[in-house]
Image (spheres, grey):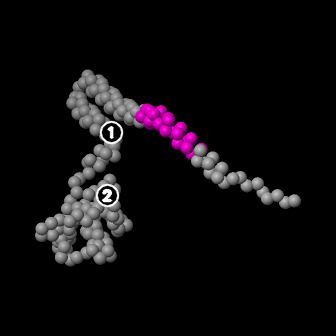
Amino acid sequence: MNQPPHQPNQRFVWVLVLLMLFSAFMLVWLNKDAIQEKGASLRATTQTSLVEEEETSQIQTTTQATTVEEAIETTEADDGTETSQQTETTELEVTTTTRELTLKEKYAQLPEGQEYSIYQYNEDRIDDLHVKRGFEVMIERLKEEGKFYSTVDYHLTFYPTLDENIYNITLDEYYADKVIHRGHYRFDYRAKKVAKY
């Protein structure tokens, strides 16, 4: 006789799956304090390692300063050493200021954004090629979306980024009684495109 193949009870399988998921959830919930402590200790170790790296870079610059001072002291024994002392001190200044900048410091050193009006663009009073192309691409995008009106005074503010060919742009519409902010865009000079973000 042919017996049908054995098929487990599907309800029983689902109950087992739910029981396993529940037990896994309970284990995580019961050990959440230990997990949080591990995360906190990991963050603390990364912060201390960053502080240690910064301290070692400061120590390196101070050791460079002491070696330059020692070099100056040894050259003072010779006659006519004024020129060598001057070159040594300028080298000291250069070595202490040429430490590597963090990303935050690099962004802080970028110039402020500059605002341009569509009237400046139409009258060809803009010298920056990036700004001109930004206006061209932005006007084309507004025309494609059906949102470009020739009577509106559009203002674009160009904010530089670390890449000299990419700008962050804000679009504002100026009317006689109000200003309407229309969004933030990322402009790529090489690709000639604007993406809203």
Q: Is residue 5 above or below residue 84?
A: below
Q: Where is residue 33 in the image (x, y as percent from the top left)?
A: 45, 34
Q: Which residue lies furthest to the top in this view?
A: 77
Mark 1 residue element: loop
Label 2: element kind: loop
Residue 99 bears which disc, if any? 1
* Residue 95 sits inside the magenta stretch: no
Q: Residue 1, position in %: x, y?
A: 87, 59
Q: Which mark is residue 164?
A: 2
Q: Is residue 88 above or below residue 12?
A: above
How far apart are the two marked residues, 2 and 1, measured between alpha carbons? 22 Å
* Label 2: how many Cα within 10 Å (few below 14, some 14–19, many 20+): few
**Badges 2 and 1: C-beta atoms under 8 Å apart?**
no
Q: Please state which of residues 168 and 45 is positioned toward the viewer in this rendering.
A: 45
Q: Earlier in the sequence, mark 2 or mark 1?
A: 1
Rendered location of residue 2, percent (x, y): 84, 60
* Identity of the residue drawn at 28% across and 56% down: 160
Which residue is at a point 26% across and 51% down the rendered structure image?
A: 110
Residue at 18 percent across and 76 percent down: it is 151
Q: Give the range drawn in magenta.
A: 20-42
